[in-house]
Amino acid sequence: MFTFRPSIQPMEPYIPGRPIDDVKKAYQLSHVVKLASNENPYGCSPAVRDAVMATFDESAIYPDGYCTKLRAAVSTYYGIEQDRLIFGAGTDEVIAMLGKIFIEPGDEAITGEITFSQYAASVEAMGGTMVYVPLHDHTFELNALLSAITAKTKLIFIANPNNPTGTYFSRKEQDAFMAKVPKHIVVIFDEAYQEYVSDPDYPDTWKTLRQYPNAVLLKTFSKIYGIASFRTGFGAAHPLIIEQMEKIRSPFNVTAQAQAAAIAALEDQSFVRESFRHNRRVMESTVAVLSGRGIYVIPSQTNFIMADVQRDSRVIFEKLMAKGYIIRAGSAFGMDSFIRITVGTEQEMEGFLTALKEVLDEG
């Protein structure tokens, strides 16, 4: 009856964490804590609400398609020229744009075998093939990425820190890697969790952009800035790349409310610092408890942790959900005995740890 593009047929839809209301209804619970999608448990800057409400009277008109004010704010904060920026309804949309401007049927892209699924979606939707390279110690192995390059390679997607493992590679490693990548291959660095990194040897990808025209940087307002529901992210790249992306960008893709929210969130760096401080403190105490039970936790530079419970993660996922805690089963990433846990507030994590102990003690 219908004829669909062949490249779409083998693809699977993205499956997000279970919504809180669904879990409440399914298990007849009055209180549910979501620790599944790496959101900021402290919400967002108080300034965001006022900024969003100030745009209410603009609801009947289309938003500024060029994100003029947001573009200026990002340009000023990061010290990057405005013509090097493009905005999307989350970095998901920016990732999809990159696939659309670079990938044709038969082309290849490279990424880690355990990482964010939307990289593959952007490539496969255009008829390309994603080549997966094993991680080393749960971290992107940059030399292995280099070894996977062929005449068909167009893009390399790298999450740093990586999702779902939470690991990162250093500035020295990134510099050595970029020096060896052929200049016609575009390297996309996704730094969704960069604001949670504490180690001083983390890469300066803004400097990488200046040095290498084939580098692209992705940033989001969905994580530490706490405005995931507004779907706002951006890419930074050489103006020639941005020019092509603008050709296929949806005309009014970032709402007026989302633009206002992002500006207010960016301007309140004190909220960002407090979110980082709380996250690090609660993460450390959570890891200490898990380690004390003999549970291995992958060292994380993000707002989530991957813990090896040495059980079927799907079973643990279901049992925790019945107790009111939504996490992600590692089976979704090919890590069957691991669970991914967003670091919530101190109270949320105390409740989670109690629930996890009960589940594990049940056998």
Image (cartoon, rainbow, N blue to C red):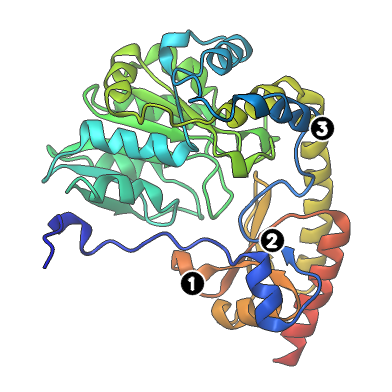
Q: Amino acid at mark 3?
A: Pro
Marks 2 & 1, CB-CB < 8 Å contact: no
Q: Which of pointers 3 and 2 lies earlier in the amino acid sequence?
A: 2
Residue 200, above or below 77: below
Q: Residue at x 31, y 25 (%)?
A: 245
Residue named by callout 3 = 46
Q: What is the crowding at mark 1: few (fewer than 14 residues within 10 Å), some, or many (at least 20)?
A: some
Callout 1: helix, strand or loop? Answer: helix
Q: Amino acid at mark 1?
A: Ser
Residue 233, above or below 363: above
Residue 270 versus residue 51: which sits nearer the camera? 51
| Label tally | 3
> Residue 88, can we see it?
yes
Callout 3: helix, strand or loop? Answer: helix
Q: Amino acid at mark 2?
A: Leu
Residue 15, above or below 167: below
- Nearer to us: label 2 or label 1: 2
Please state the horizontal and vertical placement of residue 159, each as a whole percent of the image.
Answer: 47, 41
Q: Residue at x 84, y 47 (%)?
A: 281
Q: Residue at x 76, y 49 (%)?
A: 41
State the mark number for residue 331. 1
Q: Viewed as shown, does residue 248 lie left or right of 42?
A: left
**CA distance for labels 2 and 1:** 16 Å
- Nearer to us: label 1 or label 3: 3
Q: Which of pointers 2 and 1 lies earlier in the amino acid sequence?
A: 2
- Nearer to us: label 3 or label 2: 3
